[in-house]
Image: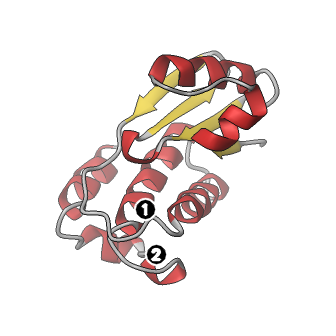
Amino acid sequence: MNVLVVNEIEAEAFTGIKIQDLKDTRTCIKLLLERCNKTVITLGEKGLLIGEGSQMNHIPAHTVSTVSTLGAGDAFVGVMAAELCQGAIFEKSAQIANYAAAASVTRSGAQTSYLTPEILLEHPVLGESFQQWHQMS
């Protein structure tokens, strides 16, 4: 399975398209999907856009108090890769990774900001919605 995960700056560099809104992001992901049929563009506080084949879905960011964004991208990619390796479908893995990235920005540092699923369930802002979402999927 090939999956491409890029942020806005990387998507702009790969496609030559300046991202100013979700429409631009959709244009970028269409171009990236020509080369990799599972693609994610992370958008920071605006969430992320995922594409698989000809399908696209915007996943909004979780509203949290940001302490540091250092390591958020790594948290996202690491959790998404782990979920995919465990057999999760593409969109579910992106949803779970979105929770992990949101939780990571609420703490300082890179590796020290990463939370286990058990700790994430107890997160004061994300825990309840993570638990509800996780039970539905």
Residue 124 position, x and y percent, is 17, 69
Q: Residue at x 55, y 20 (%)?
A: 24
Q: Residue at x 29, y 44 (%)?
A: 136
Residue 126 position, x and y percent, is 24, 60
Answer above or below: position of 108 versus 34: below
Residue 5 position, x and y percent, is 66, 45
The amino acid sitting under disc 1 is Ala
Q: Quadrant of the C terminus?
A: top left
Return the residue nearer the eye: 133 or 20: 20
Answer above or below: position of 101 versus 42: below
Residue 2 position, x and y percent, is 78, 42
Return the residue nearer the eye: 76 or 134: 76
Disc 2 and disc 1: Cα gap in Å? 7 Å
Near mark 2 (Cα within 10 A), the count class, few <14, some 14-19 or many ≥20, is many
- Dot 2 corresponds to which residue? 114
Circle number at residue 109: none
Return the residue nearer the eye: 18 or 102: 18
Q: Residue at x 52, y 77 (%)?
A: 110
Answer above or below: position of 115 versus 101: below
Instruction: Answer with mark 2 or mark 1, whichever residue precedes in sequence.
Output: 1
Q: Please tell me whether mark 1 sits on a helix, a strand or a loop.
A: helix
Near mark 1 (Cα within 10 A), the count class, few <14, some 14-19 or many ≥20, is many
- Dot 1 corresponds to which residue? 100
Kindly indicate whether the residue at mark 1 contacts the one at mark 2 (C-beta within 8 angstroms).
yes
